[in-house]
Image (cartoon, helix red, strand yellow):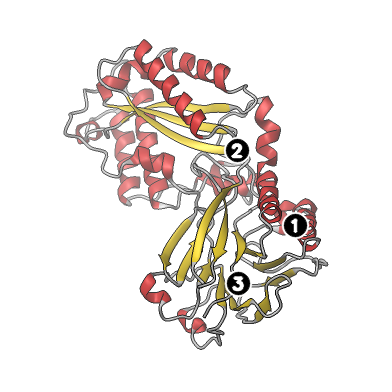
Amino acid sequence: MTQSPFRFLHAADFHLERPVHDLVEVPDHLRELLIECPYTAASAVFDTALREEVDFVVLTGDLVQPDEAGPRGMLFLIEQFQRLAERNINIYWAGGSVDSSDWPTLAWPGNVRRFTGGEARRWLEPIGDRGGVGFSGAVQIFGANDDEFTGLDIDADSFSLALVNGEFEPFSAEWSKRHAINYWAICGKHQRATPVDVPGRVIHSPGSPQGRCPAQFGPRGCTLVHVDALLQVNLVFIPTDAVRFISERTLIEPGIDRARLERMLIDRLDAIVAQNSATPLVISWILEGTSASVAKFREGRLIAELLGRMRSEYGYRPTPAWVADLQVAPALAPPDAWHEQDTVLGEYLRQLRDFRTGAADLPPMDHFLPESNQPGALAAAMSLVGGERRQAAIDQAAWLGVDLLGGESPPHEIPQAATRGDSAVDSWMGMEEVQ
């Protein structure tokens, strides 16, 4: 069976209510850019739909939390939907955990088909003005189980599309064979992912169009989906992020001097800028090495001077590359011997070890916030419920304790055999925001 080729745009996770966070400081000249970037990136999604003249748009939820974003978030969506309506581009919107229900009464443009949690629908629709050429079996499931996908009357003679937002994630190539769906449009992790991409079966999440913090690093955007005459799918990533977070790690070799380190960092920064030439950057950087190689850089003014140079030379360009953080971290964990010392530091490290192993409960970080901030996004950003995020934070706290409680010199050199078993530096910089 063949039909005319078509294409559509798949986007999700706008989260217009969530500001950029986890930055220690924000320079004045980037403040407006960072405040507006969630809306700027979302606008770029709709710009892409118009520029590419897609046949329709699929939105798999979590666009905006109405009570947190206020009127601006809802009015923004109405304006963007209206732009597409003027070009006869339909929108299929599967409500997620933040935008499924409890919305004020709004008059959405006529091109919007919105589905809320718990619904399972199927239909056959023409694409654009092509008459009978269309897709069928568009299904939205929120918090469903596998049984709810069984028995759907999918038209085998047309392209089948499922919209999924929720906690149901059995996705695999073998599982997808049990269901007559060509394209599963999913979301929920804020990162672009394609669990399945085989002939006739694609399961794809476009991720968020904009990162919100250093942990959400790398290009963010939406996906242009091409469907050919044989119903085969080709995915094209379209970047939309107004600000791109970059996570960088540089290994400090033993004996490296200031001049060589500075040259190495500048060369790497030039490469990062070249790779992301059209997008403003916010860079978090870790200098990693053995205790001996990083000790001379952990104190004094060197790091501050290097950070100042990179900011002054790269952070104020028309397309800025702002180094938000430059930290020095040993690549090896504090040895067991440090934990057993009868000192304040030893007691501190033992307590952290109990947190790490689960022998003691880590106190909720949001309790340290003023009561007025505890229900909002700031408290959510401080959550340490994720495994990697929790362990990485504990490891960072351990080294901070060594600096503050270890006296003028560390208890002793870390043996080369000691290892950081959970790759905490990678986890700390690479963890995805806990939802």
Image: 12 above or below 433: below
Q: Position of residue 339 (x, y in %)?
A: 25, 35
Mark 1 vs mark 3: give the one in front.
Answer: 3
Number of labelled discs? 3
In the structure shown, which secondary structural element does the residue marked by tag 2 occupy?
A: loop
- Where is mark 2, residue-wise? 243
Identity, as a three-letter code, of the amino acid under mark 1: Leu
Q: Is residue 410 visible?
A: no
Q: Residue at x 36, y 28 (%)?
A: 250
**Disc 1 to disc 2, C-alpha distance:** 21 Å
Horizontally, residue 400 falls left or right of residue 20, namely left
Using a 10 Å C-alpha cutoff, classify the residue at mark 3 as few (fewer than 14 neighbours), some (14 to 19) or many (20 or more).
few
Image: 297 above or below 143: above
- Where is mark 1, residue-wise? 77
Q: Nearer the viewer, residue 7 or 298?
A: 7
Using a 10 Å C-alpha cutoff, classify the residue at mark 1 as few (fewer than 14 neighbours), some (14 to 19) or many (20 or more).
some
- Where is mark 3, residue-wise? 4
Q: Nearer the viewer, residue 407 or 196?
A: 196
Identity, as a three-letter code, of the amino acid under mark 3: Ser
Q: Position of residue 68 (x, y in %)?
A: 70, 53
Disc marking residue 273: none
Q: Residue at x 21, y 27 (%)?
A: 414
Q: Earlier in the sequence, mark 1 or mark 2?
A: 1
Q: Position of residue 253 (x, y in %)?
A: 27, 22
In the structure shown, which secondary structural element does the residue marked by tag 1 occupy?
A: helix
Q: Nearer the viewer, residue 65 or 341?
A: 65
Q: Residue furthest right?
A: 107
Q: Is residue 364 visible?
A: yes
Circles 1 and 3: CB atoms closer than 8 Å: no
